Amino acid sequence: MDVLLSIPLISAVLTPSLSTSVNILFFYATWSALVLSHKPEAIHATSLLVVRVIFWLAPSLLFLAFDFGIPSVAGSIKFDGAKRLPRRPLKLIGLATFNMLLVVAVEAGVSWLYTLATGNTLYKVSTTLPLPWQMFKQTAILFTARETLTYYIHRYLLHEGAVVPLLTRLHTSYSHGEPICALQLYADHPLPLVIYHLVPVLLPAFLLHPHLLTYLAFTLLTTIEGTLVTSGYSIVPGIFLGGIARRTARHYASRGTANYGAWGILDWAHGTSKGKDFMDDARDEADKHNLKERSSAKLDDGAGMVQDGVDALRRSTRKRTPKKN
């Protein structure tokens, strides 16, 4: 929710204020200047790179430095402990960084080819900002499509091996050859990685044609999610986000025999969950909110009792006060 509120258009609806209006005005002026002075493909590619560098590469390198710099402390908050660190961290950094740049380049190339072939941009790029409800609806569709496509691609193409055995061998040897760590999101062979990362987001984009700002908001949220849940840390905040991190760690610990989905919904539906599943997280979330509601109700009851006592005291005081002639 905090991430959503950081998006100016959504924040303006949920928490309107003068400062928010000024921020939106500044954002609109900046966005308009960007659209009028640069090609849509350049805005798309540059934005993707900036999001990946700031919200994945930079924090992942910091996490990795923390793991190796203070292994005793890092091990206490990691699923696999301090003993499960990458054996060749420099090679891992090189592979993951190359793959991230490759994913950005391929996505930008697909967008450019689409424009070249159709004369239209894959994403709507204009000075008109998308409406908050439209952003929310399209982002929800993108997340739903990603969850569905990620599950089936991950399970049937990258692990079960019956469809394309080569992809399974490459993914298993590269992605599951080292313990899970901060760079895990892009630590894979380039071929299965491009398929796994791009098909679940590009295919829905072809059908939906969202505003570029909507797609970038979706990319921002998925990048932050991916960075946290593949970090290997057991202290990822939030019940749902922590649940995804736990299932991701179990996926790698089991060498890919369970937990294929991004959020675990289809794992629960297909019976491929290992450990606490999506429904367990939902129950934990419900219990947490029920506890808050019960605490609030008790607080209200206590406040009501205090108020009743004060009112009774006032009535008794008025009765004892003699009337003046």
Image (cartoon, rainbow, N blue to C red):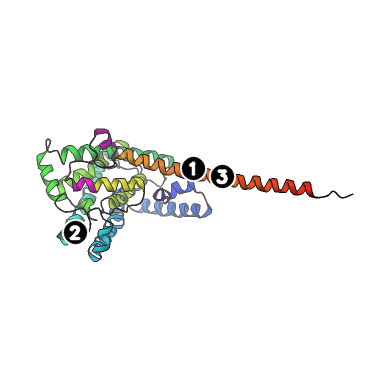
Residue sitting at 41 percent across and 50 percent down?
2
Q: Is residue 24 above or below residue 136?
A: below
Residue holding disc 1: 294
Residue holding disc 3: 300
Q: Are marks 3 and 2 in contact (CB under 8 Å)?
A: no
Q: CA distance from mark 3 to mark 2?
A: 50 Å
Viewer-side residue, 120 vs 257 = 257
Among all residues in the image, which is located at the extreme right?
Answer: 325
Magenta highlight range: 249-274
The answer to which quarter of the image holds residue 128 is top left
Q: Residues within 10 Å of mark 1 (few under 14, many from 20)?
A: few
Residue 258 painted magenta: yes
Residue holding disc 2: 83
Q: Earlier in the sequence, mark 1 or mark 3?
A: 1
Q: Are marks 1 and 3 in contact (CB under 8 Å)?
A: no
Q: Where is residue 289 shown, x and y percent of the image? A: 44, 43
Q: Secondary structure at mark 1?
A: helix
| Amino acid type, residue under disc 1 in the picture | Arg
Residue sitting at 25 percent across and 65 percent down?
70
Is there any visible trace of residue 59 in the rendered image?
Answer: yes
Q: Which tag is nearer the camera, tag 1 or tag 2?
A: 1
Q: Are marks 1 and 2 in contact (CB under 8 Å)?
A: no
Q: Residues within 10 Å of mark 2 (few under 14, many from 20)?
A: few
